[in-house]
Image (cartoon, grey):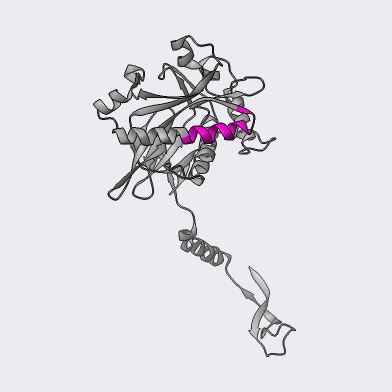
Amino acid sequence: MRFPFDCTRGGDRIGSAHWGWQWRRVSRPLTIPLSGLLNSLRMFDKSMDFLKPRYIPMSRRRRIYEGKAKVLYEGPEPGTLIQHFKDDATAFNAKKHEIIEGKGVLNNRISEYVFQHLNNIGVPTHFIRRLNMREQLIREVEIIPLEVVVRNVAAGSLATRLGIEEGTQLPRSIIEFYYKNDALNDPMVSEEHITAFGWATPQEIDDVMALAIRVNDFLSGLFLGVGIRLVDFKMECGRLWENDMMRIVVADEISPDSCRLWDIKSNDKLDKDRFRRDMGGLLEAYTDVARRLGIMGENEPPRGTGPVLVKG
C-alpha cells in the first residue's frame, strides 16, 4: 500500500484550525507492507474482544429442569435462572403434542409484558428481564407444587364437572387448587389437602390467594381494554428466599398457554383451546393477542424460531 503524503510537524500558522500538523508532498512515497497492516488490524481487533457481548451456546449451559413448554438453565449470577420458551404445544398432560414454530417466541414476549406490568404495580414475581426473543432472566424460586386456577366464566373442566353452560358468567371469581402431578392428571385439591401434606402452610395459602386476586384484577382490566374477555387463567407461585427472609411470588408464565381468552364481540378463542379442540390457527390467535397489547406492530409478521444463543 502506497501513500503519496506523509505527516510532519509544522508551526502554529498551519491551517485555520491551528492543529500544528501539515501534509506535504515528498519525492519518495511512504511504503507500508499490506500484510503487516492487516496483521496489525487483526491484533487490534482481538485485543478489543473484551468489549464484545459474551454469548453462551445452549449446549454449553447447565440444564436445571425441562418441562412441557419451557427449559430452565443455570443463570449468569447466583440465584438466577434462564427460562427458555419452547415451541411445543401440549394438552391433556402431554397426551397430545405438536411443534408450532414461533409459539415460544410469542409466549416469551407476552409473558414478559404481563410480568413487567405486575412488577410495576407492586405484585412480586420471579421475572427480572427478557434476554432475547425466546429467553428471559428470572429469580430462582422454590416452586409450590400447586396450579392456582382463577375462574371468572364457566368453561373447560368447570363447565363439564358442574353441568354449567360454557360462557356463563360466574357470580364471583372462584379460586381452585390443583396438585402438580402429571401421573395423577393434576387432581383438584382442597386447602386441607395442601396443609395436611405439607405442600404449603396456611399463611402461604393466604398469600397465594391474595396474589391470585390481584393478578386476576389486573389481567381482567388489561385484556378488557383491548377487547378480550379473561375467562380463566392458571398461575404458579414460589418461595423466594432473600437471606433468611422468604416471600411468595408469582412464577412460571402468564400467556395464552395459561389463560382462556375470548374476543368480547365474537367469543372467538385466542388461547390454547384452539390446539386442545383441533380448531387450528393457534399462532394467528397468539399473534392477535400480542398485537392488541401493543407488543407487535399491526403489519409485523410473527417471528421465526428466534435466537438459540443467550447473553451471558
18 in relation to 170, above or below: below
Examine the rendered structure and indicate whether residue 227 appears above or below residue 139.
above
Name the outermost residue toward the front: 171
Q: Residue at x 58, y 34 (%)?
A: 221
Q: Is residue 255 magenta?
A: no
Of residue 124 and residue 73, the one placed in the foreground of this image is 124
User: For the point 61% across and 28% down, which residue is it?
Assistant: 228
Q: Is residue 108 visible?
A: yes
Image quadrant containing the N terminus: bottom right
Q: Position of residue 296 (x, y in %)?
A: 63, 37
Q: Nearer the viewer, residue 67 or 26?
A: 67
Magenta segment boundaries in residue numbering: 214-228
> Is 234 displayed left or right of 26 in the figure?
left
Residue 32 drawn at (x, y percent): 59, 71
Q: Give the x, y percent position of residue 11.
A: 68, 90
In the displayed structure image, the side of residue 281 where residue 276 appears, left or right: left
How would you classify the magenta stretch by its main secondary structure? helix
Rendered image quadrant of residue 167: top right
